[in-house]
Image (cartoon, grey):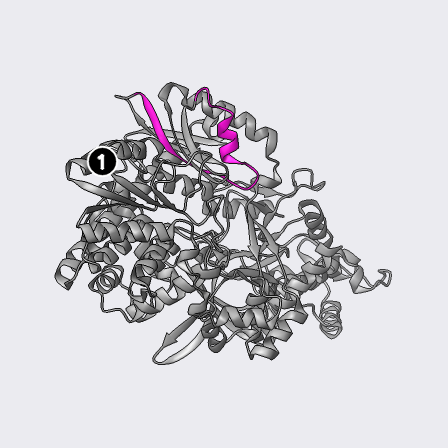
Amino acid sequence: MILSKKKWQVERPDATLVQALQNDLQLSSIAAKILAARGCETPAEAESLLNMTEASIHDPFLMPGMTEAVARIEQALEKGEKILIYGDYDADGITSTAVILNVLLDLGADVSFKIPNRFIHGYGPHEALFREAYEENVQLIITVDNGISGIEPIRVAKELGMDVIVTDHHEPGDELPPADIILHPRLPEGDYPFGELAGVGVAFKLAHALYGELPTHLLEFVAIGTVADLVPLVDENRYLVKRGIQEMQRSLSPWVQALCDVASTEQAKINEETIGFYFGPRLNAVGRLGEAAPGVHLLMAEDSTKATALAKQLNACNVERKNLVKNITDEAIALIEADKKIGDSFVLVVAGEGWNAGVVGIVASRLVELYYRPTIVLSLDADKGTAKGSARSIAGFHLYNELAKNRDILPHFGGHPMAAGMTLPMEHVDELRTRLDAQARACLTEEQLTPVVHIDIPLRLDEISAEAIEEIATLGPFGTDFPKPVYVLENVEIASMRKIGAAENHIKMELTDGYEKLDSVGFNKGHLQDELTYGTKVSFIGDLQINEWQGRKKAQFMIEDVQTTEWQLFDIRGIRQTARWLHTIPKDEALFIAFRPETMTYYQSLIGVSIMVVDPTLSNIDQSDYIVLLDLPQSIERLEAILQQTAPSRIYAHFYMPDSQYFNGLPTREQFAWYYKFLKNRPAFPLNMHIADLAKHTGWPLEVLKFMTQVFFELGFVKMENGLTTVNENAPKQALTEAPSYKQRSQQIEMEQKLVYAPYIELKQWFDERLQN
């Protein structure tokens, strides 16, 4: 039995709808399932999603303030006014800055940009930077991906005589900034058709309006910012990203090739995962560690030499960011494991002096993945006496609302249900942990503390092919509100498996349903070979990929999680070298059972853990998930009693047996008759002296002769006095099977046949019958 630490929640698309999508659109069953699971209720809806056109783009002038914004910028162009683009330090802000820079430079503007430093200025408009702009004779400020909450700095800018256009997509507050114009897709008085644009999406709308036509050359920026900011990939966002990816795949922009080079990816294969895992993190990294301006310079680079140098700079920042995240995560885990008060809390609050405040949000996410509890990671500044950091939550714990209950000790915070940022006095960190723990215990149940995996595409092996996987790629881009499918293979069996990799820490399997077979690979899952057995029904969740080798494409399943509710039999019979099987057993969790004291004596030093010798009443045997049967029991009934007592989910069958009787078998009646006649014809025969010669004469094993003699003695057919054997002709007639040694040998042979020499499938069936009962 292997149970996942996560709860699997399998959802099954409507079969009738899936069939209709297959038939009408000529799709594979997998593609049809995905579309049905993503909310396409008719073939027509699916068709429009698959074949989006430029008509999906809404008129930019539907956004309130767009007409006025275009007029004010055109005025600045006519008068030669200095324009400042005020951006943000993440990938969305950097790409937003690049979009407006491109359009204004194309239109001949006198334009520059500023991006606040995360550590000096913090997020959004900053009065000092606006005053700098005034000193530089800036007359018009355009914010991108920020500004909707910058009330006081924008008020200062207006007092200084500068005009301000805010373009933003973050949640508007009750009070709007005193800007001249605000471009926002979700303003209360607005009616723009789609409110989920990223910051770069809003900037693109302004560029579209200024150009007077769709600026397709800017779509590659829009794709990066939109994917990196995790906004919903629906409506026009979907078209913008899809077209943007296509533009990047064939782009001549030096920065695209430079990013591909440092990320070791092919330009023609760029997709949303390339952006999310390779491009976005590198653009984000510079802003997390310091100045974000190099990210803008990269996107604006006009020659490959400059682009390559800047891409390498971003890459180095990303490597440094990864190391910082790893080091802080390791330190945070050490704190959690060492301090029971921290580790037992329902809300993990960890703090460390000097931790980089730019990466603590990533660390918090890692800790949530590991512990599945709401988590706050704080960087302590002893000089200022402050703790600054980020938080991530889980379903059921509304982070913003719960933090809001602690305003008396938490003066500065902001966020939403699943993420937040905050600054508080250092002396209140422990108090905040205590309060949040109590709050979480009041609203979180044990069930809510178990992570849930939402699985939406159950698969059969006969549905999976390289062609079907290639078709799935055409359904993209996948992302927020149009998530990548999570596939499940239910109740398949393992046809073969082996560990792979230099350290043998990965696994390659062949899965089967009895008819079809499918290759599968599990990275960092080499341990599964020691936890799974053949003939067991197993379920896997994961992803589908194409393995291409020497021009041949083959489907394969990438294993992410596994579980089985069936018990498992691990066959280690006949492996004499203990080292060959001992490492496959979780020794700290397993119960090693010996039925004979001599077995314990033999194995104790070899195994290195305590061995339980079964006592007659089984009083020393408790329930155990994993049992190791080191030797054969004295009887089948004894083994059946052990199975009932332990109720195992995993059995390791070794059945060490130094004195096998199976191949010697039982002597025939003819052999017994011949031996009896031999002894009868030789009264007072010195058996002990000549039994070896007799064995050589008959060709029977010496052990068999000794056994037959024992049977005769037990039944009274033969007696021995002074080393001489004599046949007792007056002994009562009895069947040979009545002799205790005959019964014992017969039972021994039967046990060996069933437990030691039976094929694996028969042994598994034997245990199955008893465990089911």
**Coordinates of residue 720 in the picture (x, y in percent):** 71, 56
Disc 1: which residue: 129
Frontmost residue, 345 versus 301 = 301
Does any portion of residue 661 appear in the rendered image?
Answer: yes
Residue 140 falls in which quadrant of the image? top left
**Residue furthest left as drawn:** 305
Does the magenta segment cover residue 584?
A: no
Tell me if 749 is positioned left or right of 381 in this view.
Answer: right
**Coordinates of residue 408 in the picture (x, y in percent):** 46, 19
**Coordinates of residue 115 in the picture (x, y in percent):** 24, 43
The kind of residue on which mark 1 rests is: Leu
Does any portion of residue 346 appear in the rendered image?
Answer: no
Tell me if 635 is positioned left or right of 42 in this view.
Answer: right
Residue 101 vs 88, above or below: the answer is below
Which element is circle 1 on? helix
Tell me if 61 is positioned left or right of 49 in this view.
Answer: left
- Residue that appears at 27% across and 47% down: 285
Q: Which residues are magenta?
A: 385-409
Residue 721 falls in which quadrant of the image? bottom right
**Coordinates of residue 212 in the picture (x, y in percent):** 32, 63
Instruction: Assess disc 1: are there few (<14), some (14-19) or many (≥20) residues with their C-alpha within 10 Å of its C-alpha.
Output: some
